[in-house]
Amino acid sequence: MTPQDIDAFFASRDALITDQYIELEFTFECAGDPRAAAAHLASEQSTAQWQRIGVAEDFRPQFAARVLSLVSSPRPAGFSVPVPAAPAGAVHACRAVIAHPHGNFGPRLPNLISAVLGEGVFFAPGIPLIRLEDIRFPASYLAAFEGPQFGVQGVRDQLQVYGRPLFFGVIKPNIGLPPEPFAQLGFEGWMGGLDVAKDDEMLADAPYSPLATRAALLGDARRRAEVATGVPKGYLANITDEVDALHALHDTAVAAGATMVMVNTMPVGLSGVRALRRHARVPLVTHFPFIASFSRLPLHGVHSRVITRLQRLAGADVIIMPGFGDRMMTPEHEVMENVQACLEPMGHLKPSLPVPGGSDSAATLEGVYRRIGSVDFGFVPGRGVFGHPMGPRGGAASLRQAWDAIAQGIPVREYAQQYAELRAALR
């Protein structure tokens, strides 16, 4: 690029009609001039060739992405990690905000992702390491999306749960259990105080546990638990499958008694999630398989917050995400950024219920609540309920007992002296 071409890919917000652009925040390491690298990044994801040979035209004013800000600092030691076939030149670490005209791809998720997380980003000249840190949408773009159908309030209304977190439980064993004992475990969890018993993300329409049979038995068990307890209960059925099977599986599960359905976002695809949201008659829950493969490293890929925003855009009422604790290997600030992306204002879109998960139990509930600072979250133990020494009824009861202590301002360990279930969970 000539110096004039580089300058053409820079702009100030004041010079743009900002409602026509989404904003992308990138961190990257580049070789050579950071301004040239940032210009290439904007160019390659939009109008890499902006005119025909021998024709006096320039498509950049309407179609080019523009660099709004760029901060760079030299890295005398070179790239942070070894890079095969690394470009030559002095290395800089950079942070750039880019405005991309959304008219280039329209309100279509596959096209959006192709632009902002595609070839033009990850093969931009001089930039071998790059991460999309955040994405922000103007109201004009959000207007084309339905977003969550039920949102936080709708899920609360369905379950008649207010003023506290919603308690989910992942029925365990998650793989291999026939529908009959699986349904009995769900019943025991509901009787102990679970709001929602759910399929594991690995359990879908399996030969040893066909969805139709499992959902019918869980639906019957759910209704019996509702009669026995006098409060609504939820069964969350995992319908992850080929995209062309999702609508039929939704209908099968809901007709049998599922009150929510779940899909694994990235294996199904965001467009599949969006299509299912348009069909769904119950809250739609999304799960995080495959997300860590491109979000975990801070130097390359995409921040999980971006995927959270996209799931909300696609219409997820509940978003299960990697949570706190060592097992999930997710920094606490990143978990909180994902929670915020579910709940913060996003045009007309309803908030999604955040469910940070991973090796939770009654012993971790207070820590999760204190970090989030709100009751608007779901708490989703697996073994913390279904591996409890006193069985799933005791495991679910321990969650409710822990919450009662928190709500009353009583130390959980002190409160546990009154309740065997909570004492066992804390051990």
Image (tube, rainbow, N blue to C red):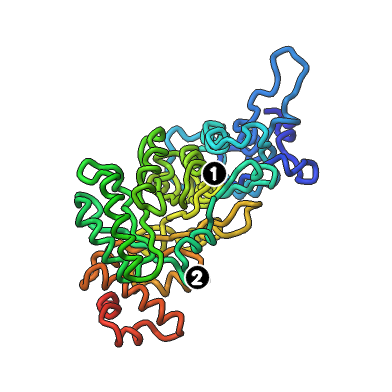
Instruction: Identify the amino acid type marked 1.
Output: Glu
Q: Which mark is residue 29?
A: 1
Question: In this image, 225 relative to 250: left or right?
Answer: left
Secondary element under disc 1, as helix, strand or loop, is: strand
Quarter of the figure that contains the C terminus: bottom left
Q: What amino acid type is highlighted by mark number 2?
A: Tyr
Q: Looking at the image, is 3 positioned above or below residue 198?
A: above
The image shows residue 73 at horizontal and vertical percentages of 61, 50
Task: Tell me if 48 is positioned left or right of 162 in this view.
Answer: right
The location of residue 122, given as percent across then percent down, is 51, 36
Residue 15's spot in the image, x, y percent? Answer: 80, 42
Residue 3 at x, y = what percent?
A: 73, 32
C-alpha span from label 2 to label 1: 47 Å
**Residue identified by numbered label 2:** 162
Q: In the displayed orientation, state which residue is furthest to the front.
A: 227
Where disc 2 sits, the SS reads loop
Cβ atoms at labels 2 and 1 below 8 Å apart: no
In which quarter of the view is residue 351 placed? bottom right
Residue drawn at point x = 29 percent, y = 55 percent: 218
Circle 1: is it few (<14), some (14-19), or many (20+) Cα within 10 Å?
many
Taking depth in this image into account, of 328 and 230 the one nearest to the observer is 230
**First in residue order: circle 2 vs circle 1:** 1
* Residue 212 visible somewhere in the drawing: yes
Task: In the displayed orientation, state which residue is furthest to the right.
Answer: 15
